[in-house]
Amino acid sequence: MASEPQLAAVPRWTPSPRRRQDDDEADHKGAADMVSVLGASMRGTEGFPFGSGRSFQPPPFLPPAEAEQPSPEISVERSENDCVAFAVARETSSLRPPDQGVVLAWEDLWVSTAGAGGNRRRVPILCGLNGYARPGEVLAIMGPSGCGKSTLLDVLAGRLGSSVRQKGDILINGRRQKLAFGTSIRAIDGKHGDLVSWNAWIELQAYVTQDDVLMNTLTVREAVRYSAQLQLPSGMNAAAKRERAEETLREMGLEGAADTRIGGWAHKGISGGQRRRVSICMEILTRPALLFLDEPTSGLDSAASYHVVSRIARMARREGMTVVAAVHQPSTEVFGLFHGLCLLAYGKTVFFGPAADTNQFFARSGFPCPSLMNPSDHFLRTINKDFDKDIEVGLDGKTMTTSQAIDTLVNSYKSSVHLAKVMHQIEEIRANNEGCQLVKKEKQPTFLTQSWVLTKRSFVNMYRDLGYYWLRFAIYVALCLCVGTIYYDVGQTYGSIQARGSMLMFVAAFLTFMAIGGFPSFVEDMKIFGRERLNGHYGVASFVIANTLSSTPYLALISVVPGAIAYYLTGLQSSGEHFGYFAAVLFTTMMVVEGLMMIVASAVPDFLMGIITGAGVQGVMMLNGGFFRLPNDLPKPVWKYPMYYIAFHKYANQGFYKNEFLGLAFPKNNDQAGAGAVAMITGEEILKDYWQVQLRYSKWVDLAILVGMVVLYRVLFFVIVKLNEKMKPMVRRLRFRNVERHAISSGH
């Protein structure tokens, strides 16, 4: 008789022991027991593949020696120079010195924005928030959509918009950070009153935004390696930087997709979840002291979300990093990885404290988590009033609306021991750390290194992006074939004077006008520049130089090949010098237009509005270029002075005309030729009388002026970006002082 088949061993789930309560919470034993019964889903998942759901349990794949270590704690030690150092306790493998951790705290934080429809009343977004984040820990910010999670991250990172007002204190290692905006953050040393520049603050942090702004033409490995070369210290050699990039790819599980292009509209690439992980990779290369993550699990499945968050949590413990993450709706396993939780409901704090204590808090407030339910689902369902017809049922069986449930939880938190602990911790941070120095990271790569890396990356992007230059090249070839065949072999008759001038004007005006076709691609580059600039990867000058150098070969190709087709089919002067000058002017004018569009992009970031704006500006310049209306006939106010001299078409047209007409002679028409007169007209006479060209200087001066305009437009772009960085914080500080004065006067 055949033996019965053996059943496969299947791991079974068994409940874990009940959690012990703190001594100071012993009077809540009845509610805690209820939590133990109703919140079983939080207490134990040892039989599941992802291990325990406890907040302080380390990831199960860590080495045993590391897994046995408890979560890091902050110890405060006073050195001989009376400066307190925050140290990450029980972490011996950290690469960051123990006195370089960043403790972030915020107290009585208010954020408001202008009311809609001309309403002058301010609409609050965040209402009196208090909290802190410590080295080696992951603080999760949770709440329903529109509750202020991203706004809180922006406030802490110093990225609030100009229309938003902020009140309250943000402390960095006990030092007060005042009125941050964009890239101009200033912190006040609480002891000495010294100003700390944005560069000192930006070195502390990295920010992964909700939107994955990546260079679509690069592969995953190329994107991370270029980022490593831009960010990692100059003391690291190239091999070490490559190894750091590969290590980070492995951490985020991207080895399988490392050689796949990121992809965009023209090329199918990696998935949305993989794009998310690439964005995280690029910001954790330097192991920043302070890491902000906005929706790090967006687009990821539950397993990928767990592994990504667990690796970030492990890195935070190992490197002494302070991690603050806005998370929408984590799974039970992901929730168990968070050390602290800041739960928001429409700008108000519902709970702040250890993530493991949230279930107890909700149960004591009358909203226990049902058995075997994801706690984060329960928390968010309880405080989401977008569907306020749904009602909550408390422990006493009474029904209430979601708004009433939120008010109950907010009031419960205000009277709880958790808020008292938060305020005590903030006071301790403020009292013990005045006068300490901010963290300094190792020296970044040199300006030349960053410019070279950016040039290589931009060159590769332009080569692979068909819409950047290659499509324009094909259209230029087609247009120049049209021009060459329409004006084919114009000859040297009197009628050819107008034909030559019209052909050269078309090249100077309309061919260069088409340089705006690459504006959408440049806007994408500007988005990447904005993200990397805010995270302190490199400066504005490096970006401008790299963009100029990388675009030069493509513009030269467009100038020479299509230009030669139009030039020689038309039958213009055939010497090499004349064609070389023609190609040089065409190349320079296209560089001028690209510089002009850079200025437009800095003011109008939307590519459709930018194209319309750039086309309008060029149209005005084209009208004043000296062809549609001769220079002497232009109205002198505005159009002759100064618009005629500002328009680059003036110098392009005059350079083309001098290059072509000087040295030629044309027969006069019948009306001009008298009896016995020489029936010829020289090129100098045509330039002076027909086209009203200034002959006081040579054609090379026109080319030199165009080259100067290329430099000037790029310098203007640099100045505009720098002014935006400097002026917006100043305007914001003035507005904030007015708000403070108004509040004080209202109080009296």
Image (spheres, rainbow, N blue to C red):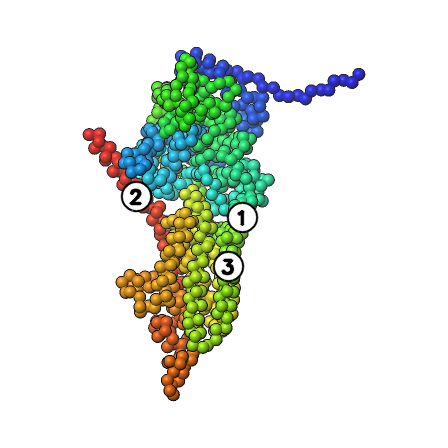
Which residue appears at 40% of the width and 67% of the height? 653
Which residue appears at 53% of the width and 42% of the height? 245
Residue type highlighted by circle 2: Met
- Dot 3 or dot 1: first in sequence order is 1
Residue type highlighted by circle 1: Ala
Residue type highlighted by circle 3: Ile
* Mark 3 crowdedness (10 Å alpha carbons): few <14, some 14-19, many ≥20: some
In the displayed structure, 338 sits above or below 472; it is above
Q: Nearer the viewer, residue 231 or 555?
A: 555
Task: Kindly give the residue lying farthest to the left in the view shown.
Answer: 748
Location of the N terminus by quadrant is: top right
State the residue position of label 1.
Answer: 266
In the displayed structure, 667 sits above or below 142; it is below
Q: Considering the numbered disc 1 on the image, is that residue within a helix, a strand or a loop? A: loop
State the residue position of label 2.
Answer: 730
State the residue position of label 3.
Answer: 475
The answer to whether one can see residue 28 in this image is: no
In the displayed structure, 311 sits above or below 667; it is above
Instruction: Give the CA separation, mark 3 to mark 1.
Output: 18 Å
- Label 1 or label 2, whichever lies nearer to me, is 1
Instruction: Give the CA separation, mark 1 to mark 2.
Output: 42 Å
User: In the drawing, does residue 331 fall left or right of residue 426?
Assistant: right
- Label 3 or label 2, whichever lies nearer to me, is 3
